[in-house]
Amino acid sequence: MTKLHGIRACVFDAYGTLFDVHAPVRKLAAELGGKAEDISRLWRQKQLEYTWLRSLMGVHADFWHVTSEALDYTLDQHGVAEPGLKDELMALYLKLDAYPEVMEALETVKSKSKLTAILSNGSPSMLEAIVSHAGLERFFNLVLSVEDVGIYKPSRRVYRHAMQKLQIHDAPAVCFISANCWDAQAAAQFGFQAVRVDRFGLRDDRIPGRPAAYIPDLGGLAALL
């Protein structure tokens, strides 16, 4: 088991790492029929693509707006026009399920006296809603949104923002945890000791940065610290 040394803070991605982004569509799968899985996958894909495209274009909109536009595209692409369905899906996005091991894993990390934070693309109101819904408020010293910076991950400005808020000046003192390959790799390239949560059996992307460690779920994090 790889051990990470000199860690002062654990910084977690939210969507896909702590919270299951596919839960909303799964809860309405009966109404979407055989399209449900494809709809959930495309919604997530477009949500991420729009954050990157807006960052490159210099035309920022918050994550709620981006998530809504991604869902509009997805439902239109799949020919779904049932009244009220989009509103239901968006409402469920404020009540995402935490993955089953998350609470116990966070308990263990906190017992090691590390600073803990969320660093997410989500807007402050979105993050407040899902953290509260999951009952995880007590586990985090800070919940940080890219809205404070005005650009999305993987901009280096976002990772630097976390260091400033945590008052940590040495990037390797931060353990950054994400289940998104591009996010974990970008954080590693920035200088964090990144841990990728390999929930989905994915290979690293062909971009700079390599995580310091890989774990199947968050239950394996404490052993690295």
Image: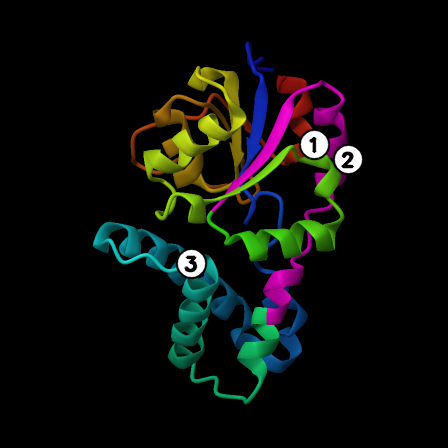
Report the number of discs.
Answer: 3
Q: Is residue 79 above or below residue 209?
A: below
Q: Could you say where residue 153 lies in the image, as x and y percent from the top left?
A: 38, 43
Residue type for callout 1: Gly
Q: Which residue is mark 1?
A: 219
Residue type for callout 2: Glu
Q: Which residue is mark 2?
A: 104
Residue type for callout 3: Asp
Q: Which residue is mark 3?
A: 62
The quadrant holding residue 223 is top right
Label 1 crowd bin: few (<14), some (14–19), many (20+), radius 10 Å: some
- Identify the mark nearer the N-term, 1 or 2: 2
Residue interval drawn in magenta: 91-120
Residue at figure coordinates x 40%, y 70% from the top left:
69
Secondary structure state at the residue bearing disc 2:
helix
Quarter holding the C terminus is top right
Left or right for 11, reference 158: right
Q: Could you say where residue 47 lies in the image, as x and y percent from the top left?
A: 41, 60
Q: Is residue 92 magenta?
A: yes
Residue at figure coordinates x 49%, y 19% from the top left:
168
Label 2 crowd bin: few (<14), some (14–19), many (20+), radius 10 Å: few
Q: Is residue 33 visible?
A: no
Q: Could you say where residue 188 lies in the image, as x and y percent from the top left?
A: 40, 26
